[in-house]
Image (cartoon, helix red, strand yellow):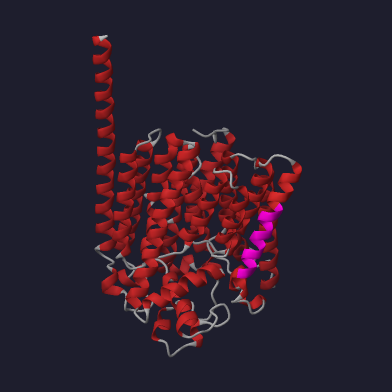
Amino acid sequence: MGNCILTSWLESVKLACVSSWRWGVLGLIGLTSQLLYLKFFLRPYPLLAHYAVPLLDLGKLTGYSHAAARDFGIAFLLLFALCYAAYLLCRGRSSSSGLLVVLLFAFLFGLTLLMVYPITAADVFEYIAYARILIHHGANPHVLRPADFPEDPLMWYSAWPHITSPYGPLWTYVSGVVGLLSGSSLLTYLLLFKGLALLVHLLNSVLIHTCLARWRPTYALAGTLLYAWNPLVLFESAAGGHNDGLVVFFILLAVYLFVRGRFALAVPVAALSCVVKMPLAVVVPLFVVGGWRALSGQRNRIRVMAFSVAVTVALVVLLHASLWEGVGSLGWLAREDLFTSSFAAVAVLALRQFVKDAELLRGLVRYAVFVLFGLFYFWQLVRVRGDTRHLVEGLYWTVFGLITIAILWFQPWYVVWLVALGAVVPSLAIGRLTTLFSYSATWNYLVFIFLLAWYHPVMSTDHSLVANLVSVLLVFGPPLAYAAWKARSCRWSPL
């Protein structure tokens, strides 16, 4: 009996030592990542030094230097390598200590990036402009434009002064709250919008852990880290101040409700994501189908899901009501004519010499893209079952298809949607694909900020066909190649 006690004690000590070693390495990876954020982002691009100058970006700040492009590329390469190493370290582990380490470093990374100037996108300045229109001018930003208020000095920071808000009404209301709190201080606006993005990022990380802890606890820590430490997500949230974290917050909350069996609530909550950004409306039917198949009894299914859909429609209509001034107030519809860094953009630019009517060409390509995505989407709806695994996989592949096929005007921050969903799919292959896509998306910035400036005569050939083609190959090529290889070998099974 004494030997048994001694053996048990030695095993406990061994496990404790291994666990301590693992969290020590995780902490070392976190510290190294933090140093990289300080060196490559905060030090060269401090918010406080640049925020008052309108319309700056990475290229203007650095004079489009080769050194800046090199450092930007190296920073993301190293950060993604460290993030993936940390992800592998956490696989199969469930620990409150590990979760604390992950969340503390996510907060530290975010806090550092909070003080970084938004060097790759001016969207946060657009949020400010629309908030000013709503709160300080008492007008509707879905109808009037920043250019309609030339006397307001904060409108000078808008990179798109001649378009109305392309966002959903829920984001307009959230922006209005920020506007009430910010007064007329540009710095306060920036810090609040960026701080809100960081807060939502941390909430999403907790939601991911909560969802996974209920149905796949051994993957909860790894899934949380996959999102919380993802360099693209952190950069677009805390540095760029993008609202995409709020989009996925509602989707993740809906997943949590689905895991809890609250199918009727999951649908309207998921719908809140599309009244922030409309393209995410595609996720709502998956929750309807998943809930329908999870419920038992035909009459019960009809009663519950009919009520859920009715509440969803009423909620969406109510949120639009106070800002509705006709179809023209749906600003996101105007983005259908934008073709950039997508397969659709390459098709439009490549076919210009064969189809002279530009409007007809864009319409044909748009129609072809939507039919292709529609077929893919229908396949995902058919595959959805009434269990969590099939739902989250369906959500992941639907958003993957949305980004790679249906989005005509691709931007790297759209991949944030995919990372959040990839984090709740307990699959090593999905984790790898998600990380690879996140990294390859950063090349979009290098192409359109640096390569386009350095090799402008070549890259701008045929209305920037070459630039768009290079971007598409670099951004979508690696993840699509990996996805095709894994699909061929049938290795998408969960852990």
Question: Where residue 103 appears, x then y in whole percent?
Answer: 34, 49
Q: For the point 48% across and 87% down, which residue is it?
A: 149
Work out whether residue 223 can be spotted: yes
Left-right relation of 189 to 352: left
Question: Where residue 284 appears, x then y in whole percent?
Answer: 62, 54
Asked if residue 252 is among those painted magenta in the image, a careful observer would answer no
**In front of the other: 11 or 236:** 11
Left-right relation of 301 to 89: right
**In front of the other: 208 or 350:** 208
Question: Where residue 107 appears, x then y in whole percent?
Answer: 32, 54
Left-right relation of 207 to 41: right
Q: How many marks?
A: 0
**In front of the other: 261 or 142:** 261
Q: Main secondary structure of the magenta part?
A: helix
Q: What range is drawn magenta here?
A: 306-318
Question: Where residue 371 appears, x then y in whole percent?
Answer: 70, 56
Q: Is residue 12 above or below residue 220?
A: above
Q: Is residue 156 above or below residue 381?
A: below
Q: Is residue 219 above or below residue 37?
A: above
User: Which of the 4 quarters of the picture holds residue 463?
Assistant: bottom right
Asked if residue 317 is among those painted magenta in the image, a careful observer would answer yes
**In front of the other: 345 or 375:** 375
Q: For the point 65% across and 41% down, which residue is it?
A: 294
Q: Is residue 389 above or below residue 246?
A: above
Quarter that holds the N terminus? top left
Q: For the point 55% across and 48% down, which residue is it?
A: 257
